């Protein structure tokens, strides 16, 4: 892709926008960056992006920049239906995402991972497996380093593992992973998409350019994922924890994973893993499938799985106090993620709530009836959650996280589990899900024997 002297507009100056601008300038493009925020709000983020070929437009967007550019690179936070982007599209301007731009300069096999939940854990684990097998591996995308940092660095790598969001997939054209992975689908980002179907369609774009020579790793147990598998041209490799598979990877018995591919079978026997929960079993199988498909050895692969620790704020064990285990799952900001968390335990005191995201709480009903002994609700969503779920079990309200944890400690019987898995975003009470997690952990650690 020739970029020298082309007029390129970068829309949105978060991390991927900065990476895009820096890369384009390094390739000789004439770059304009634009963002509705003021320049001083970027706190030095732009310090490494400067050139006589760079023009900055902050606090506004200028229509002429959109319709007179040769190319527009859009950051994930910018909605696809932005009126100026639509004008540029109508004018025939090529509009692409950062991952599309990056992929045009990458030759190593690309493993792209998406889904409503589990993307980050699966991406990081797959990266560790490839590294344990001796492959020089770049790990990034929607986590850590933008994908463009790989071609910008000119690093020589063997494998590229990236987490991909639905937002990043909106403007792809030729983006083609060797392995595309769809972990699960549940309602999310309905503040961005006009319908659940539109969100789903954005996710499915990860398979758009794959051919029969590529692989699609899919969750066989997720009805929405599987019902769309017939439209995928790549060779489908399913994973399941509920059914035996003739081809793919599955786990029907505790402490055993079976991999079947190309007429071969390998059984992985394991004891206690550092990753907890049924959702992490799914993440493990998906990561293993992608790795084994691209040349990883069985022993090194499973050694990496055994040594992999849970990421912060994703089903993380905090403490055992008075015979009760406390787990923090603050990253569970949607109902689908909480479903997986509840499937992992019995005798649960669930702390949930926060800023409501507009999705249905109905998928939680059978699991709350079956597994949740007590429900402690916090935040703006507490009233709605109590109306829809409160009659299913013993339900309480708390004004703060500290109060919720103390209350949970009083009502949870010996052998039970206190689980923070909110099903909501954190912005009503906290800066982000990490601050919410820290508040929970701090409150748990303050519990004292009496």
Image: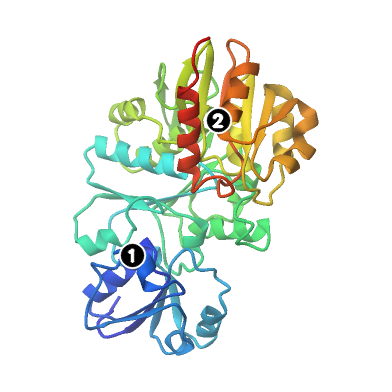
x and y percentages locating residue 295 in the rendered image? 30, 40
Task: Give the percent coordinates (x, y) of residue 368.
Answer: 71, 28
- Disc 1 + disc 2, Cβ < 8 Å: no
Compared across the picture, whether 363 is left or right of 426 comes to right
Which residue in the protein does label 2 denote?
Answer: 402
Query: Residue 279 location, x and y as percent?
Result: 53, 33
The number of numbered badges drawn on the structure is: 2
**Nearer to the camera, 355 or 179:** 355
Figure check: 243 above or below 111: above
Q: In percent of the image, x 40 and y 35: which residue is there?
A: 288
On residue 244, the disc is none
- First along the sequence among labels 1 and 2: 1
| Secondary structure found at label 1 | helix
Residue under circle 1? 102
Left or right: residue 173 versus residue 361 is: left
Q: CA distance from mark 1 to mark 2?
A: 45 Å
Q: Residue at x 67, y 63 (%)?
A: 194
- For image coordinates 33% across by 67% down, the residue present is 18
Q: Nearer the viewer, residue 139 or 105?
A: 139
């Amino acid at each position: 892709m020739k970029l020298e002297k082309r007029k390129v507009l970068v829309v949105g100056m978060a991390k991927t926008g900065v990476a895009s601008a820096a890369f384009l300038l390094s390739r000789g493009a004439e770059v304009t960056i634009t963002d509705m925020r003021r320049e001083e709000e970027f706190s030095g983020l732009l310090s490494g992006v400067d050139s006589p070929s760079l023009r900055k437009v902050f606090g506004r967007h200028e229509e002429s920049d959109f319709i007179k550019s040769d190319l527009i690179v859009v950051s994930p936070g910018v909605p696809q239906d932005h009126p100026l982007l639509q004008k540029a599209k109508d004018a025939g301007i090529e509009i692409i995402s950062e991952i599309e731009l990056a992929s045009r300069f990458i030759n190593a096999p690309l493993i792209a991972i998406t889904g409503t939940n589990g993307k980050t854990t699966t991406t990081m684990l797959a990266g560790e497996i490839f590294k344990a097998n001796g492959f020089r591996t770049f790990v990034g995308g929607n986590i850590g380093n933008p994908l463009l940092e790989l071609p910008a660095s000119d690093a020589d790598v063997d494998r590229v593992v990236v987490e991909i969001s639905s937002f990043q997939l909106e403007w792809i054209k030729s983006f083609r992973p060797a392995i595309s992975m769809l972990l699960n689908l549940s309602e999310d980002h309905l503040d961005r998409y006009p319908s659940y179907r539109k969100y789903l369609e954005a996710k499915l774009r990860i398979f758009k350019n794959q051919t029969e020579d590529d692989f699609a790793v899919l969750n066989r147990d997720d009805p929405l994922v599987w019902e769309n598998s017939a439209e995928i041209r790549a060779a489908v490799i399913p994973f399941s924890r509920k059914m035996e598979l003739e081809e793919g990877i599955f786990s029907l018995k505790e402490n055993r994973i079976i991999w079947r591919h190309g007429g071969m079978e390998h059984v992985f026997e394991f004891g206690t893993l550092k990753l907890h929960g049924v959702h992490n079993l799914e993440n493990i199988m998906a990561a293993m499938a992608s790795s084994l498909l691209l040349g990883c050895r069985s022993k090194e692969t499973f050694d990496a799985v055994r040594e992999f620790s849970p990421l912060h704020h994703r089903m993380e064990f905090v403490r055992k106090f008075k015979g009760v285990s406390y787990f923090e799952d603050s990253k569970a900001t949607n109902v689908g993620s909480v479903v997986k968390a509840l499937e992992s335990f019995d005798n649960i005191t669930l702390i949930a709530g926060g800023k409501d995201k507009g999705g249905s709480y109905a998928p939680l009903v059978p699991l709350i009836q079956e597994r949740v002994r007590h429900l402690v609700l916090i935040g703006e969503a507490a009233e709605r959650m109590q109306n829809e779920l409160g009659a299913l079990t013993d339900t309480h309200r708390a004004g703060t996280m500290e109060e919720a944890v103390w209350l949970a400690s009083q009502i949870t019987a010996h052998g039970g589990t206190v689980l923070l898995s909110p099903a909501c975003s954190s912005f009503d009470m906290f800066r982000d899900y990490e601050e919410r997690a820290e508040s929970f952990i701090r409150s748990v650690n303050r519990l004292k024997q009496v």
